[in-house]
Amino acid sequence: MNKVFHRLNTAVIKNFSGLFMVFCTLLFVANITSCATDEDIDEPGDSNLDEETLLLNEWMNSTMKEVYFWNNRIPSSLNYKTEADPKEFFEKMLYRDEDQWSSFTDNWSVYLKEMEGSPVSMGYSPAFMKVSGSDDVFIVVKYVYKNSPADKAGLKRGDIILTIDGQKMNGENCYELYAGTSYVVGIGKYNAEAGTVVSAGQSVSLDAAEFKANPIIHYEVKEIEGKRIGYLVYASFTSGVNDEFHTSIDKTVTYFKGQSITDLIVDLRYNPGGEMGNVAYLASSLAPKEVVLDKKVLTRMSYNRNIQDYFQISNKDSARLAYYFYDNESNLNLNKITFLSARGTAAASELLIAGMKPYMQVTMVGDSTSGKYVGSWIIPDSSEEPRHDWCLFPVVLRYSNANGFSNFKEGLIPDFYVADQLLPAFPFGDLQDPVFAKAVTEITGVAPAVAKSARLKKVQGSEIFPVQMERKKRLFFPADEAICGF
């Protein structure tokens, strides 16, 4: 057991060199007597597998049996020495009755760039949609990262993509076409009166490139009915290399302070999660000053039995059993906040909302959130010299707020339900956006006149087309703070 975690700890140091300050605050190698031994996780029998597959299977087997939250549910009949397909082997280990989220990548070097906030992509977030009775899929652009290839090409929120490289999209090819590195998109337009989407006769060329994916997509201050309302759209919980995106939070908070805002709306509709450290930073920027000065509990974590027992008897358990607010010079000192939510609001976003509730007046406007009440660790190859480009993202913990609230498998329920409108998708901060308009109404007590007049038809029977990309982000806790020296 000690050998397993020594290797994992070394991998964190080796593989996170450019990401050290993003995920890592403390690295240690601990001698454990309460954990299982290496022999306990070995499997009997000879193997006819090739060396690469056998090494990969052994790594996954030892890792999952030690850290996986539902490790007692891994089938005892599984033998890593006889599983010819590592991807299928990983899936067989998962407790899918509860676990919808554990995953892996076999292209960690590429995924790492995204985790750093420097992805190589087009830089727009797609909502895959279709019309009932048709196999055709089209994309509505939810948002565009500033200075990304999509931004430079002129794409914006609400744009409709009907074709990619001249091909119509469907349920079989939509993600593959979207994920390409160079293509031409055919632009569509929404006919509100007819409730249809048709070609606009325009096209845009896109080429993927590396850019800084600052999670602050939009911010502004609106003065409405005597209220000065700050509005922040936060796309993912990403700190960036050397915490560069924390600086962006500081600048935004300083702007809000300078504008003497009376209220704040934080838009998390399209935020599927991210790093715990970034959650704590943003929360400490918004919470009441006394909460951050007193270092109140933001969230508590519980693990499988072995890990929980170890942390509870360890002198170093505080950073691994709870996260706390901390003093932040950029603190807004709010006593109330409004969050915009949707079904895509997940994991770290849900933790932020739940974590703030014990300390301030929290109002939710929009749809129920996704219901991800668990967190993952990031676990790359555990060898001195990486033998493969795999990385595991297993669920290892369940979290709760300071009041012990964690039972939201069906999602956090909004105080005011309003369906997110993507046909058309109005610009951020536009009072024709029904979710944003409802939040403003609840703050001011007066419904904006422009919102009252927005009575547009939607495409009949349209629905969000579910794809894997929509659930790619997770709630990640630092792997270096794990049991036995991760």
Image (spheres, rainbow, N blue to C red):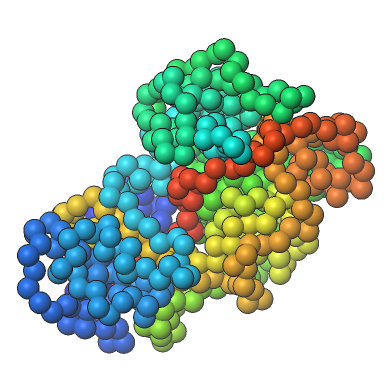
The residue lying toward the viewer, choosing from 70 and 318, is: 70
Q: How many marks?
A: 0
Residue 294 location in percent, x, y? Answer: 65, 70
Which residue is drawn at the image coordinates 30% and 48% (left, top)? 108
Which residue is drawn at the image coordinates 37% and 24% (left, top)? 182
Classify 394 as above or below 402.
Answer: above
Residue 56 location in percent, x, y? Answer: 19, 60
* Residue 83 seen in the current view: yes
Query: For the N terminus, which image quadrant?
Result: bottom left
Residue 325 is left or right of residue 180, and the answer is right
Residue 476 location in percent, x, y? Answer: 45, 59
Give the quadrant of residue 189: top right
The residue lying toward the viewer, choosing from 8 and 110, is: 110
Give the quadrant of residue 62: bottom left
Residue 172 is left or right of residue 75, and the answer is right
Classify 433 as above or below 79.
Answer: above
Residue 219 is left or right of residue 306, and the answer is right
